[in-house]
Image (cartoon, rainbow, N blue to C red):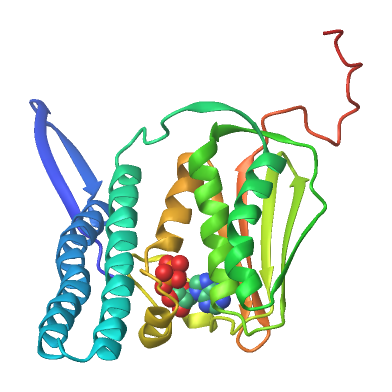
Amino acid sequence: SGTVLLQVRVAPVGPDKLLVLAEDRTEARRVEAIRRDFVVNVSHELKTPVGALALLAETVQDAADDPVAVRRFAERMQAEAQRLSALVHEIIELSRLQVAGALQEVTTIPVRDVVSEAVDRARTTAQAKNIAVTVGGTADVLVFGDHNLLVTAVRNLLDNAVAYSPENTRVGVGVRVRRGLVEIDVVDQGVGIAVDEQDRVFERFYRVDPARSRDTGGTGLGLSIVKHVAADHGGDVQIWSEPGKGSTFTLRIPAADVPQELPQEDPQPP
Ligand code: ADP
């Protein structure tokens, strides 16, 4: 809503003078609400796979003398357990990121390394859908940051690009430098996201289509993690998308080296 919450403090500072301090608490209250929601959401999200596991365990007991059924239920239990484990992993990751100073180990990192590691890891799932992942325009550029977190962020974008694309399509990753920012694009030819959903997808546990996301093993936390990683590196993440055409997510992080527009100095002898 358009309501603004103001906290006003009045203090006498002289015989005929009052000091009035008005603080906008709108944002603080919003953050508190998000935090409360998170706990409620986490409990809710955990209940689903735990409930499924309990039910499957019961069913498998009833089917004890049918080896084919036992096997099938065991496989489903394994899938639910994996989902649960991924969810717990992402919840921990996100809670860690929500604490200031979450960057564990800050070094100077070639963006190319981050991209190639993320692409290597995403290729297996891409191959299963016959999706070609191509890397283009890898500018030779450095950023300051946490290598693992940056790989996680790019990997999350790639996993989504693959998950929300039909078979036999292409996913592209590109790197460029613009106005001192390294821009990492992840482009897909997938289902796309309607304009009114484009901000919401960065919210924790938000999924455009919960049933579909469940099939792909999604937790609804991937993009919130990307957003936090970007912010912790002094950057952001942008989205361009059109339903039925595809999406482009751009992770922008300040470049650590000499801006490429400037003439480079002669390399120092080793
Ligand atoms: P999930 O684990 O469900 O993928 P995310 O936080 O990564 O969670 O994404 C939130 C939602 O945004 C997804 O459930 C999906 O509906 C939508 N989404 C994310 N990436 C894409 C994409 N590349 N194309 C289409 N929809 C996407």
Foreground: 78 or 118?
Answer: 78
Q: Residue at x 16, y 84 (%)?
A: 60
Residue 210 located left or right of residue 249: left
Q: Residue at x 45, y 62 (%)?
A: 223
Residue 79 % position (x, y): 33, 73
Q: Measured along the vertical axis of the image, is residue 79 above or below residue 122?
A: below
Q: Residue at x 22, y 45 (%)?
A: 22
Foreground: 160 or 195?
Answer: 160
Residue 134 % position (x, y): 77, 62
Q: Quadrant of the C terminus?
A: top right
Q: Residue furthest top?
A: 269
Q: Is residue 1 visible?
A: no
Foreground: 151 or 223?
Answer: 151
Kindly indicate the quadrant of the structure image that contains residue 70.
Answer: bottom left
Residue 72 located left or right of residue 191: left
Residue 99 located left or right of residue 133: left
Residue 8 % position (x, y): 15, 47
Kindly indicate the quadrant of the structure image that contains residue 216.
Answer: bottom left
Q: Measured along the vertical axis of the image, is residue 215 above or below residue 26?
A: below
Q: Residue at x 27, y 57 (%)?
A: 88
Q: Is residue 44 visible?
A: yes
Residue 123 % position (x, y): 64, 62
Q: Quadrant of the N terminus?
A: bottom left
Foreground: 32 or 7?
Answer: 32
Q: Measured along the vertical axis of the image, is residue 193 above or below residue 109?
A: below
Q: Measured along the vertical axis of the image, is residue 147 above or below residue 168?
A: above
How many discs appear? 0
